Amino acid sequence: MKKLGVLPTFSVVIPTYNSGEWLSRAIDSVLAQHGPEVEIVVVDDASSDNTREIVERYRKRVRYHRFEENRGVSRARNKGVDIATSDWIAFLDADDFYYPDRIRSHATWIAEDPDLDFLTGDYDYQGPDGEYLGSSMASHISGRIIAKKAGAFERFVMESGDFEEFVADHFGDTHTLSVRRTTFLTLGGYPGGFQVCEDVHFLARLVAVSKRVGVCRKKLGVYVVHHGSATRKNHVSAQFENLRTLRALLGASVEFPLPVRRGVIRRFRAARLNLAYALSKSGRRMVAFVTAFPLLIDKPSVDSIRRVMSMLRGAQS
């Protein structure tokens, strides 16, 4: 084990929009962190609920900024980083929460290995009533690959050979990401104008400028799955937005290192196929076929023909 250096300072940015029902739990989970004290920045994206009153309960323990007009989660996160004063940034959506070792796990590793470009980790999925729905690394091919490579070790450092699979279907999420504030600002933060997949857009750009990425296999927090969310209520619309964001990322990826570029291409293809399946399931089979048809041109194979023809039958095979 490397000698432990000075622990880095951390700010946790919590964007919130009408999430008063869960906000206290999120803030409390940060205040309950073991290890170094962290700065908490709450950015209220023009909420019309009791968010302001909830933050007021914490007074000097939380820095608070409010937008008077709704600007979206990307701009809220970016504003939080602008306000933050720490060297490292972590994020937490208002309806999710951290486990007590979330910050310490990354802070101590950074102190031991300051050459890490950013860090990520595993987390649990829970339903709104607390039911366990699985874990992130076990649910993604890239996570299972890393777990196998890591063996019995809790930590693993990803390098360029791991980046394609990670970008194609990453196992980490925003609330397990730790990134230098200077790096975040240099990259321009999260992209505005997108409602879905803005986190993947930023993550791919971050991987593109990174060489060594720390993966903590310990569960760092909880992503709460709300089955009644807007994206789940209108799955087709969400898939259209997902593809739109990834198309923009695909254009930006021309200058990325080849493994990252390949990961973006694979993710874009998967998004096109997912949209086609969603359209087919909703009864729009010809639109689904037209959506999926470019996959035949781009990467013809027996499997792609089978998948595209399934759009016409209206069933995923």
Image (tube, grey):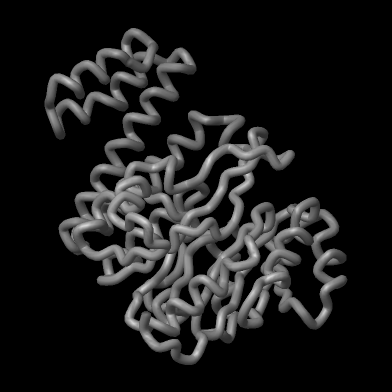
> What percent of the width, then of the height, locates residue 100?
65, 66
Position of 190 with respect to 221 (left or right) is left
Which residue is the extreme one toward the bottom?
6
Q: Look at the image and tell me whether residue 69 can be seen.
A: no
Q: Residue at x 32, y 57 (%)?
A: 150
151 or 245, which is in the foreground?
151
In the rendered view, tell whether residue 159 sits above or below residue 167: below
> What percent of the width, then of the height, locates residue 262?
20, 50
Position of 84 with respect to 31 (left or right) is left
269 or 71, which is in the foreground?
269
> What percent of the width, then of the height, locates residue 69?
69, 61
Q: Which quadrant would residue 59 be assigned to in this image? A: bottom right
Q: Residue at x 25, y 43 (%)?
A: 266
> What percent of the width, then of the height, locates residue 138?
43, 43
Give the quadrant of the C terminus: top left
Position of 175 with respect to 70 (left or right) is left
In the rendered view, tell whether residue 240 sits above or below residue 208: above
Q: Which quadrant would residue 185 be assigned to in this image? A: bottom left
In the rendered view, tell whether residue 42 sits above or below residue 146: below
119 or 89, which is in the foreground?
119
Q: Which quadrant would residue 92 be assigned to in this image? A: bottom right
